[in-house]
Amino acid sequence: MRQERSTMLMIAGLILALLAFSFLTTEDLGSFGITILSGLFQGMLLFLVAAGLSIVFGLMDILNFAQGAFFMVGAYITFAVFHGESFSQIDPNLRFPLAVLLATAAGGILGIILERGFLRPLYSRPIFQLVLTFGVAIVMGEGIKAIWGTVAYSWSPLTSFGIHQSSFSLFGQQFGLYRLFVIAIGLLLIILIALLLQRTRIGIVIRAGVEDSEMVEALGINVRAVFTQVFMLGCAVAAFGGAIAAPFLGASLGMGNAFLLAAISVVVLGGLGSYAGTAIGSLLVGLAIAVVAKFSSRPEINQTVWSSITPMILLILVLLARPSGLFGKER
């Protein structure tokens, strides 16, 4: 109880410090509000990559280095479907959900292939798992090059859909309505996955399998099948994240690695295998990135590198105070 109280105080202190720093270094309420919303947007994108990492590691003790590649694949498939001639006759407002659905399904199918075909024989060899998933990420990147080339793709304003074109005013500052939509989707997904893990039968099986997989198997439950479902869910969520990020970020070969590094820092910061830690860590890191990016863009500083190393700086600060992460346990 005392540790939980100190953890919550640490989280509250970090959030208040970031909010205070942002408020004191911005020119007006509009800039402050946009910075906070940008932080929530960044945090939700990170969560969509980190959630799969956390769930898979919590159950299977596998740190999937290909998670960023699934994010990238989701972005490319969404872009290709939305801009492809085969679907050009479909209304853009329907074409985008279809593209997201196909990208998410592709991520789940690739996840099943990866778990069943390659990872299953290596459950007792964790180092080989890391090397394998790292190699799979490289192979997936080369596959993207072979299909779509090396040129980065950006969303064309001429082919945008309704919500992507809209914006709203906050204290005189404009903020894209689509980014607000991504924030809402991310928050909804946090709740839905938490309910899945805590309130459903498969969630009970997952949590029981973490504690004692042999006992769960003795009860007649196929733990291997559960492992496959969890791995598929993690990969599908990452592909879904890339899909909904595509209208804002486009599709490029470097986006997977960029989000993977930040997502790993989120998972470690929150505590390895802790879903609650991953959700809160994503929000903390996203807010910190937005606050530092806004501050470092000032003319007297003009150093964008600070925002890119912010996740690691925050990770170091938290681990110095809590070596196992915010909600982590000694493993």
Image: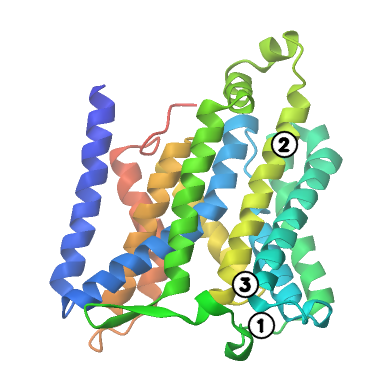
Q: Amino acid at mark 3?
A: Gly
Left or right relative to 26: residue 91? right
- Residue found 72% across the figure and 9% down from its top: 219
Disc 1 from disc 2: Cα separation:
32 Å
List the residue tagged with mark 3.
254
Query: Which image quarter: residue 10?
Result: top left
- Residue found 42% across the figure and 58% down from its top: 43
Tag 2–tag 3 contact (CB < 8 Å): no
* x and y, in percent, of residue 143 in the image: 82, 68
Disc 2 from disc 3: Cα separation:
28 Å
* Image height of 323 relative to 114, above or below: above
- Of residues 31 and 315, the one drawn nearer to the viewer in this rendering: 31
- Is any part of residue 115 visible from this angle? yes
* Image height of 190 relative to 307, above or below: above
Secondary structure of residue under mark 1: loop
| Of callouts 1 and 3, the N-terminal one | 1
Left or right relative to 167: residue 169? left
List the residue tagged with mark 1.
153
Q: Amino acid at mark 2?
A: Gln
- Residue found 78% across the figure and 81% down from its top: 89
Residue 229 image label? 2
- Is any part of residue 135 visible from this angle? no
| Of callouts 2 and 3, the N-terminal one | 2
* x and y, in percent, of residue 210 in the image: 59, 23
Q: Amino acid at mark 1?
A: Tyr
Q: Quadrant of the N terminus?
A: top left
| Of callouts 1 and 2, the N-terminal one | 1
- Of residues 53 and 96, the one drawn nearer to the viewer in this rendering: 96
Secondary structure of residue under mark 3: loop
Which residue in the rendered view is the most extreme toward the left? 24
- Residue found 62% across the figure and 54% down from its top: 238
Query: Which image quarter: residue 200?
Result: top right
